[in-house]
């Protein structure tokens, strides 16, 4: 079968009529500061890759229905131009679902405002939204089809989710009607291939080990055509409260050698992971909710700061046995910045700043975040209590973490991860109950992707449902309205601010030792979440975020800090390793 420049043969590919093998690596533009895209792409070529693959997160580009973002970190066309300038081909993976340990698997939160919508299905409401997405996306990438984009993926690991072939057919048809005249492909784990294949579309497999066994399974399902490992998992992601997952360079390189020795094409997942900046991390829920950390280092060949790691050198050596590798030196690690102590001398209470962060709306019963039109961040729900004396407060369902306050004073925390729903406190008539609910990341895999946030059911005091609520959406995308003051911080969630003077910016890592839980920003750029439970203890600060002269650091601490002081380190601390 031949479409465009890339052609499928009985056992491989040709490109412009000549035999061609994909030696690719995943590099997600949305996890890398755009001023660093060119650097990461150059290092991909120098490792010996001829192709990079990237997902396209729908929710990044359409955070609210009909509101499209294509600039800055969302400037996909510019990323594709840079890949072409570096001489790299591209595998484009637009979803609509991508998983990727990304919030909601890339599906926009506003879809979940429909209470009974069936995601990743032929539900007409979902397909209509997908059609609008492709109608916006495909004209942006159409000039790049055939060069640098060689092939386009249909959905992602659908066999692990469902068996509705008509849905996959609908997605493929939308791509074709949108002008994609290149080879399409699906990808699934070996055990899910039968459910995920689509007749007439190249099937590929995803796995991290037992390559020969996985390729044999792929050949059983697809008797002819290229053998492709569309995701060779060379590391893994971390979750809060876990350990830092790693894989030795020797073990990963051995499997890569096995793949290439079998004549297969491969895309390394990941070549460079990057960072879940802001509130973009996903989560998993297989009976217990587990949010993913901010770092997406993944123990990849190129680490979170873009420096070659041991796997980079080991993979380059393996690739050189099968394909030309550029005769250029491997770049040395970049300069890093170290500042031992930065005092955050100003502060302001979050609870006292809700008017500056977003207006409140009145409801009889508390709405979900999605019903409020909110994608991420926090929602503060407030109601007035009539009870007197000790009460049992029951929050029946929520996503994902609740901090409870009475007249602004903290009285307890409930965590979805711990299956908690009740707390005891003493109240007086007329007391204001505040429930600050944190969205810790939507589930990105499995049936749990229908993952609504905020308060999801009744709240009761001594068994009586509480009615009459004010909901304050706090997405925290704009902090300029905060009224910082000098002096000691108050109680509860507090924003802290300090200033750092720099002569010359460089990559660095923000150390939050002594802090408990929250988020951090540098010059308004959202670095992501921190949490003392680990494993991650530092946050990556890309050099382009900093500037010569004055730099502003803001930290939202949800509980308490030993001292309002942070540091910048030359090296990351991603936590203790698994044994």
Image (cartoon, grey):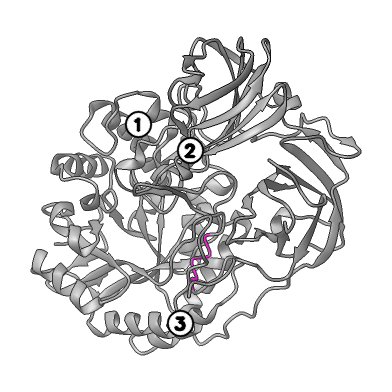
Q: Main secondary structure of the magenta part?
A: loop
Write down the quadrant of residue 149 in the picture: bottom left
Q: Position of residue 527 (x, y in %)?
A: 65, 51
> Taking 288 as reference, is 438 above or below it?
above
Q: Position of residue 65 (x, y in %)?
A: 44, 27
> Taking 359 as reference, is 258 above or below it?
below
Residue identified by numbered label 2: 420
Q: Are marks 1 and 3 in contact (CB under 8 Å)?
A: no
Foreground mark, 2 or 3, reads: 2
Distance from Cα at disc 1 to Cα at disc 3 = 43 Å
> Taking 17 as reference, is 98 above or below it?
above
Residue 56 in magenta stretch = no
Foreground mark, 1 or 3, reads: 3
Q: Position of residue 301 (x, y in %)?
A: 49, 74
Label of residue 249 in the image:
3
Span colored in magenta: 296-300
Foreground mark, 2 or 1, reads: 2
Distance from Cα at disc 2 to Cα at disc 1 = 39 Å
Distance from Cα at disc 2 to Cα at disc 3 = 40 Å
Q: For the point 21% across and 65% down, which residue is it? A: 7
Q: For the point 29% across and 25% down, which residue is it? A: 116
Query: In what element is the residue under mark 2?
Result: loop
Q: Neighbour class for label 2 at 10 Å: few (<14), some, many (≥20)?
A: some
Left/right of residue 247 with respect to residue 223 in the rendered view:
right
Write down the quadrant of residue 214 in the picture: bottom left
Residue identified by numbered label 1: 132
Q: For the point 46% across and 17% down, which residue is it? A: 463
Query: In what element is the residue under mark 1?
Result: helix
Quadrant of the rendering where the N terminus is positioned: bottom left
């Amino acid at each position: 079968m031949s479409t465009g420049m890339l052609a499928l043969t009985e056992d491989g590919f040709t490109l412009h009529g000549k035999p061609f093998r994909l030696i690719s690596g995943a590099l997600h533009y949305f996890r890398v500061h755009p001023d660093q895209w060119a650097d990461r792409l150059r290092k991909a070529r120098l490792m010996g890759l001829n192709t990079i693959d990237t997902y396209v997160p729908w929710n990044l580009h359409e955070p609210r229905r009909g509101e499209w973002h294509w600039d800055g970190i969302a400037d996909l066309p510019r990323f594709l131009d840079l890949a072409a300038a570096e001489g790299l081909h591209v595998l484009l993976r637009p979803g609509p679902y991508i998983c990727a340990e990304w919030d909601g698997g890339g599906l926009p939160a506003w879809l979940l405002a429909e209470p009974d919508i069936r995601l990743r299905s032929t539900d007409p409401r979902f397909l209509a939204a997908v059609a609008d997405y492709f109608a916006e996306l495909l004209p942006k990438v159409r000039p790049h089809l055939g060069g640098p984009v060689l092939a386009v993926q249909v959905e992602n690991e659908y066999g692990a989710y469902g068996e509705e072939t008509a849905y996959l057919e609908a997605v493929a048809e939308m791509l074709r009607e949108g002008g994609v005249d290149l080879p399409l492909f699906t990808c699934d784990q070996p055990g899910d291939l039968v459910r995920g294949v689509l007749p007439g579309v190249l099937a590929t497999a995803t796995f991290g080990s037992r390559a020969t066994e996985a390729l044999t399974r792929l050949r059983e399902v697809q008797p002819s055509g290229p053998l492709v490992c569309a995701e060779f998992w060379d590391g893994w992601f971390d979750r809060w409260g876990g350990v830092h997952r790693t894989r030795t360079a020797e073990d990963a390189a051995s499997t890569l050698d096995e793949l290439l020795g079998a004549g297969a094409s491969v895309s390394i997942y990941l070549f460079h992971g990057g960072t879940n900046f802001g509130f973009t991390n996903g989560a998993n829920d297989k009976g217990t909710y587990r949010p993913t950390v901010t770092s997406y280092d993944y123990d990849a060949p190129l680490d979170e700061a873009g420096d070659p790691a041991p796997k980079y050198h080991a993979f380059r050596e393996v690739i050189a046995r099968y394909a030309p590798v550029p005769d250029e030196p491997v770049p040395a690690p970049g300069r890093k910045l170290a500042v031992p102590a930065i005092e955050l001398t100003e502060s302001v209470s979050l609870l006292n700043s809700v008017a500056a962060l977003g207006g409140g709306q009145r409801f009889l019963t508390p709405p979900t975040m999605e019903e409020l039109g909110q994608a991420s961040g926090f929602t503060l729900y407030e109601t007035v209590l009539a009870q007197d004396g000790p009460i049992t407060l029951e929050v029946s369902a929520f996503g994902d973490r609740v901090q409870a306050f009475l007249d602004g004073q903290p009285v307890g925390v409930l965590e979805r991860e711990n299956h908690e729903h009740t707390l005891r406190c003493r109240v007086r008539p007329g007391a204001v109950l505040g429930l600050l609910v944190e969205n810790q990341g939507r589930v990105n895999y499995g049936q749990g992707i229908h993952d609504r946030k905020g308060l999801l059911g009744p709240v009761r005091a001594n068994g009586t449902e509480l009615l009459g609520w004010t909901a304050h959406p706090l997405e925290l995308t704009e902090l300029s309205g905060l009224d910082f003051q000098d002096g000691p911080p108050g109680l509860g969630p507090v924003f802290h601010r300090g200033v750092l003077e720099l002569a010359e910016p460089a990559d660095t890592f923000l150390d939050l030792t002594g802090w408990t839980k929250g988020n951090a920003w540098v010059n308004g750029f959202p670095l992501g979440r921190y949490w003392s439970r680990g494993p991650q203890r530092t946050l990556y600060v890309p050099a382009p975020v900093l500037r010569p002269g004055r730099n502003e650091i803001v930290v939202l601490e949800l509980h308490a800090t030993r001292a309002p002081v942070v540091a910048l380190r030359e090296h990351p601390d991603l936590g203790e390793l698994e044994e």
